[in-house]
Image: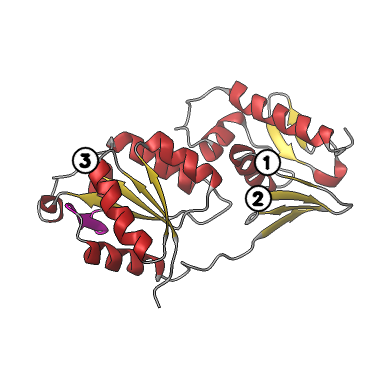
Amino acid sequence: MPLAGQLLVVSPDRAVRQAAQRCLAALGHTLHLARTVAEAQRTLARVRIDLICLDSLLPSDEAERLWRWLRADHGRRPPSLMFLAPPSAARVPGALPSFFERQRDSLVPKPIDGRELAREVARHLAAPGRGRRESELLQVGSITLDCENRQLLFANGGSLSPTPTEFRLLRCLMERPGEFLTPDELLEQVWSYPPGTGGPELVRAHVSNLRRKLRSIGKDPHLVRTIPYRGYRFVADEAKG
């Protein structure tokens, strides 16, 4: 029996969303629908999605930023990606904007044929590593980051559920314990900003929020240590507040 999955269809075209919903929901998949890339990002921040279907009508630059954001989320494997596009896009090189063109090997033509869409979805979900959600734990000292459930766990009890951005920040720092990461490095790895863009105040604000949450549950607020002019590092057991 084909694998069922959590699917996200992103299209500004109501007819496309309805056609995909009729086809895929009937096969037992859980469908999430979005009209814009911004709506899709809000869904992805709260739901684990296995496959994203992006309409080529969406702005190419916004779609590419979404994909970079997903690939920067080191806590989980990014979803599979599939495009919905006019039939000519599969035959004519350069018929699609650049980001969609690079992914043209995974394309379902519009108007949507339910059987073809179902076959392509089944192919993605049956790919090696799909349909299997492996638990991953990242431990630094006595503190563990549960990457599947997105929780920070403490050996002496208690846990913290960070926001998606705080989770990516913790993951990035805990993958390199004791090392200093500059604001520019964090902006690039956590927020997917190109090198030299973004402001360090964004990192400071999220570190401050994370410390406030740690303090509120009685944990050391300085697990993420700030070193002026050098950056940030995760220090776990050695932090004293």
**Which tag, 1 or 2, sits closer to the chain's start?**
2
Rendered residue at 35%/40% (across/down): 64
Disc number placed over residue 150 in the picture, else none: 2
Q: How far apart are marks 2 and 3 (CA)?
A: 35 Å
Residue farthest along the bottom direction in this orientation: 1
Residue range corresponding to the magenta coloring: 104-111
Q: In this view, does 82 lie above or below 69?
A: below
Camera sees residue 125: yes
> Which is more toward the observer, 125 or 140?
125
Q: Which colour scheme is used?
A: secondary structure
In this figure, which residue is indicated by the disc labeled 1?
162
Q: Of discs 2 and 3, which sits in the foreground?
A: 2
CB atoms of marks 2 and 3 within 8 Å: no
CB atoms of marks 1 and 2 within 8 Å: yes
> Which is more toward the observer, 20 or 206?
20
Disc number placed over residue 97 in the picture, else none: 3
Camera sees residue 222: no
Q: Residues within 10 Å of mark 2 (few under 14, many from 20)?
A: many
Amino acid type indicated by mark 2: Arg
